[in-house]
Amino acid sequence: MNSQIIGLTDWLKTPPGGYLLDWERAQFDEAVSDIFGYHALQLGFPEIDALQANRMPHQWLALPDVPPSTPTLPAGPDTTAGAAASSLPGASSTPSRPRAALITDSGALPFPEASLDLVVLPHTLELSPDPHATLREVERVLVPEGRVVISGLNPTSLWSMRQSRAHFYQRLGGGDLFLPEAGEFIGYWRLRDWLRLLSFEVESGRFGCYRPAFTSQKWLSRFEWMDKAGARWWPIFGAVYFLVAVKRVQGVRLLEPAWRSRKAVAAAPAAVANREPAARQRRESEPVLTE
């Protein structure tokens, strides 16, 4: 199968694509389940519901555009963009992907400053025409101490090596790509530098999908042991990385409950009068009886 002529959505239906999606779903579910707040946004990549395990009451899926091959974008009755999407030709009433709330540019989000508690970016940056602008916009809409969760393909992995080799063979007149050609790989350490410049602090980061770049499920299953071995012996060479970062703002301090911050008031020392001089004066003033 020629990966050059298929898109990312079709590639995710292949054995390596399903392998990657299974790993990422587990990482997103674990990361977002303990992040609390009121407003969460998934930016792009509707093939995975990255907010599935999150319990925030207000959640949105922002898409850059409606793909021509997309038959449906299910949404609730109270979302204008979702209602418009559900009226597309061939739209189905059965939800098959996360709720779509809006169609927007990732570099110009329609949210006020400091209004979101969580933003998830599954492969959003590498598919964005301007990843710098996307990150700046995420920093703008996040509240202080808000979190961004990011996943991306690792340019220093076995999968990336096979993709580079395929590009070389194509220049010679042959060869098929292993990964879709859309997007640009962004290195893990490069991304950490970008986040640091925007005052983000990386809380956690990990790599995954260490099996070789096989296209058949049979060979992927045979090398299942490499997931545990890779995490132990060559952890930075996984095919995909995943990180969680928090927005730090200087001068902002989280308020603690009053009972935790209240300090015990020391009791004022009681003044103790020196009673000895008064007693001596009383004895001296008393009359002395003599026989």
Image (spheres, rainbow, N blue to C red):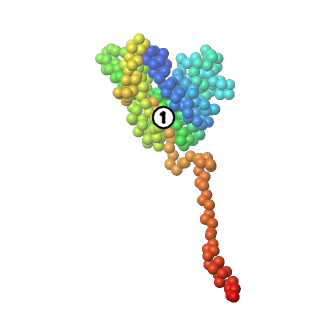
Q: Identify the residue shown where x is 47% and y is 23%.
A: 23
Name the spot of residue 256 as percent of width and height, x first: 59, 47
Q: Which residue is mark 1?
A: 244
Report the front residue among 169 and 115.
115
Q: Is residue 223 visible?
A: yes
- Residue found 54% across the figure and 48% down from its top: 252
| Quadrant of the drawing holding the C terminus | bottom right
Q: Residues within 10 Å of mark 1 (few under 14, many from 20)?
A: many
Q: Closer to the camera, 213 or 268?
A: 268
Quadrant where the N terminus sits is top left
For badge 1, the amino acid type reads Val
Q: Is residue 254 left or right of residue 180?
A: right
> How many circles with numbers are drawn on the protein?
1
For image coordinates 61% across by 19% down, the residue present is 95
Query: Is 31 above or below relative to 259?
Result: above
Q: Which of the 4 image quadrants contains residue 196?
A: top left
Residue 140 percent coordinates (x, y): 53, 40
Is residue 7 visible in the rendered image? The answer is no
Taking the image as shown, residue 122 lies to the left or right of residue 81, namely: left
Residue 92 drawn at (x, y percent): 62, 16
**Where is residue 78, by image quadrant?**
top right
Q: Residue at x 50, y 44 (%)?
A: 248
Query: Circle 1 sits in a helix, a strand or a loop, which is it?
Result: strand
The residue positioned farthest toward the left in the image shown: 172
| Residue lying furthest bottom | 291
Q: Is residue 115 above or below residue 99?
A: below
